[in-house]
Image (cartoon, grey):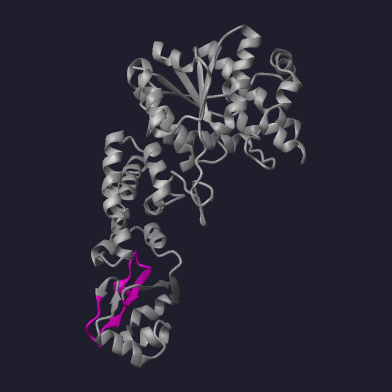
Amino acid sequence: MSKNFIEELKWRGMIQDIMPGTEELLNKQMVIGYIGFDPTADSLGIGNMVPVMLLLHFQKSGHKPIALVGGATGMVGDPSGKSAERNLLDEETLNHNVACQKKQLEKFLDFNCGANSAEIVNNYDWFKGFSFLEFIRDVGKHITVNYMMAKDSVKSRLENGMSFTEFSYQLVQGYDFYYLWKNKNIQLQMGGSDQWGNIVTGTELIRRKSGGEAFALTTPLIKKADGTKFGKTEGGNIWLDKSKTSPYKFYQFWLNASDEDVKTYIRIFTLFTKEEIETLEQEHAKAPHLRTVQKALAKDITIRVHSETDYNAAVEASEILFGKGTADSLKNLSEDDFLSVFEGVEQFEINRTDMETGFPIIDFLAERTTIFPSKSEAKKMIQGGGVSVNKLKIDSLEFKISSEQLINNKYLLIQKGKKNYYVIKVV
């Protein structure tokens, strides 16, 4: 049962560090293990999908996964991997963020499957009544300053300065592990490799304070082949919340992965078997331009994070941009998806009252907008079948642009030739 958890992680490339004895423990019994999530945003990002998948594999191997949302640690700020101290959030904001993240975690983990049902805990529950004097007496005395100073997350920040708040973070996270070990029989903490120092502080506290034994396992931090940070684009983070990142943009992120990166992504972010992935890669090698692996990855993860309906809409939206979409598929797009698809496309604004009377197509293209530099060029392109309005080819010079054609009662899409798009916004 348990052996396949470590084997699964190994072939997927999901193990960085593992404490001696961890694999033996997992092979022997059902283990309760946890991962901490940072609640500084009201949505998880795709970077959080690595620990989510780790918990998912853990549960599928017969173990019990716990997701700890850091309602208390979010008030302190983890220095790991940070070059500067971050802003601290108030309690109301943190509670809102925790509630939103809980809803997202419930989409991936099974919270009703018997002994190994997933659970969510919030460390604010055990820290809210813990006074500072109690903390330094009961926790601080067990860990030396020398031990804390030796951590990479501390050493890398000493030159530019580090507050006591962030310096003490590893004690706070270490106490989480101690509390969960003592009160919930949790023997394993997992996380990204940047958390190794904080995690082993917890195992050390358990050993020094109670003579107990606990274990640790971390995953590698994902690095993109081109050196840019995983999970970010020019437009910012890729979020799991569709109001922050539309399903179309989410789908496109995975679809546009490089051939080198997609080999890593499909192993980490999907539940495909080793054989299924190898088959996809063989197909991809025969015709790389078809992007077989990228399409399989994008489909799988978009459906699991959003829904099959969202995935189908994202595919339709993609086809619109590349000339395969229809007028009906364009009308079915939500406003968010429409704007996502045509983000960066040149826009023109038209007054709504002007739309009521309508415009002859040639006047609209050459005078009301500057899509064409002259009426003669607009006329020539229409006669050659090179102009479409909302994906419908215009075959008459008498055609009129009017409010009846508006998408979402606000937009028109003009296409000139095969690849040139223009969005008309009615204001």
To which quarter of the image does residue 317 belong? bottom left
To which quarter of the image does residue 153 belong? top right
Residue 118 at what x, y percent from top left?
A: 40, 23
Q: Identify the residue at horizontal 34%, vertical 47% (top origin).
A: 298
Instruction: Write down the region rendered in magenta.
Output: 393-417
Q: Identify the residue at horizontal 28%, vertical 58% (top origin).
A: 316
Q: Is residue 242 visible?
A: no
Residue 134, above or below 366: above
Q: Identify the residue at horizontal 72%, vertical 30% (top origin).
A: 167
| Nearer to the camera, 158 or 71 | 158
Residue 361, above or below 83: below
Name the image quarter holding the N terminus.
top left
Residue 265 at what x, y percent from top left?
A: 40, 42
Q: Is residue 8 magenta?
A: no
| Nearer to the camera, 61 or 66 | 61
Residue 411 at what x, y percent from top left?
A: 37, 69
